[in-house]
Amino acid sequence: MLKKKIKKIIISVISCLMPFLSIGQGTEVAISNVPLLDDKSLILVLIIVLLLLPLYLTGKMFLMAAKDYMMKMKNISNSNKIINTLLILLVSTQVSFSQAAPAPVNQFNFDWSTWGLFLCIVVEVFLIAYFSWKTTTFLKNSYAQEMEQSAEVKESWFERFWNKINSFRPMEEEAQLDAGHNYDGIRELNNITPPWFTAGFILTIIVAIGYLWRYHVSHSAPLQIEEFKMEMVQAEIEKSKYLSMQANNVDENSVIMLEAPDIAAGKAIFIEKCVACHEAHGGSKPGGVGPNLTDDYWIHGGSIKNIFTTIKYGWPDKGMISWKEQLSANQMAQVASFVKSLKGNNPAGAKEKQGELYVEEQATAAPVAIDTTKINK
């Protein structure tokens, strides 16, 4: 194997040096008649020498790529013949062009040597370009063939994973798995239970043991009924928060009479904020600042909406301040409901009547429908 490589390298080197051997022979013949090369010819010779290395490398890569491609195409027997033919063509081409290079100066003084050297440069550049192009073509074809072959035999990662977790057996072993049962052409195979199914079944047992320990032995987590009760308590808390937020959205147009718990809360606020002007019983006192809130006479109206408006905006010219900056809307509604509940108390020592008599509006009863189809007899 090593001898073959050395042989090919020697042949390649000789093929690249052959033009200069021929040039050297031609110059010896004409040395007596032709003077030494001029500067222009020396430059051309230097270019030819410099082009030898890329020519050798591209030629070598071309031969290697061609041989590799032919071997992959299963033409191994013909590959060596083709490669040797290409080597011979390379040598002969170099020799043929190099023989025309060192022509002597004829009687017409035509510079045949310069044109010959120039022609050698053209041939070398052409061969470099040709070898590079063909090498690229061989490599592309070889790569495409490898990708096509690998695509045919290569399984995807999912196929490998699926076959592994199911422990599929190859088709060649199907006869060994035959259980001997045939149903309308469908044979029963004695395949094992898929490992993923067995692993899932074992996992359910482990989860069941953990569930039993957590909920029925250690009682570290609530059961479903206990969890339901806890959620209902939390729902009541959330409901209270929601209602309190909704209560603060009330105004003088939407306020209504509240129930006993809110009235009690309003009483506490009234005692804290309003006793200075209205006394604790709400009837004020003779000569006091605030009016009597227990009788049927009202200066600014006695409805729940009128009372809420008075508390919210006040009457500064009469000594009643606005409480909207100190009390929330819900607190003002609670105080208004408490004041409304004081009607009819008539405490002793209360202030005299002020304002106009307020009569509570009664809800209009819906008219009773009369059945005219019935006739009294």
Image (cartoon, rainbow, N blue to C red):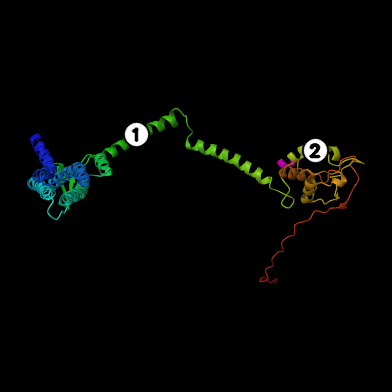
- Figure quadrant of residue 15: top left
Total marks shown come to: 2
User: Can you say whether 175 is above or below 205 in the image?
Assistant: below
Q: Secondary structure at mark 1?
A: helix
Q: Secondary structure at mark 2?
A: helix
Per the image, the residue denoted by label 2 is 273
Q: Is residue 261 magenta?
A: yes
Which corner quadrant holds the C terminus?
Answer: bottom right
Q: The residue under label 1 is which amino acid type?
A: Ile
Q: Nearer the viewer, residue 216 or 107?
A: 107
What mark, if any, has residue 205 been given in the picture?
A: 1
- Closer to the chain start, of discs 2 and 1, is 1
Q: Nearer the viewer, residue 179 or 174?
A: 174
Question: Which callout, 2 or 1, points to the residue nearer the camera?
Answer: 2
Q: In the picture provided, is 276 more to the left or to the right than 91?
A: right
Is residue 182 at least partly visible in the picture?
yes
Mark 2 and mark 1 in contact? Answer it, CB < 8 Å.
no
Which corner quadrant holds the N terminus?
Answer: top left
Q: The residue under label 2 is which amino acid type?
A: Lys
Residue 241 placement (x, y as % from top left):
63, 41
User: Can you say whether 265 is above or below 219 in the image?
Assistant: below
Neighbour class for label 2 at 10 Å: few (<14), some, many (≥20)? few
Q: Which residues are magenta?
A: 259-263
- Figure quadrant of residue 204: top left
Predominant SS of the magenta segment: helix
Q: In the picture provided, is 345 more to the left or to the right than 4?
A: right
What mark, if any, has residue 289 been given in the picture?
A: none
Q: Is residue 96 magenta?
A: no
Neighbour class for label 1 at 10 Å: few (<14), some, many (≥20)? few
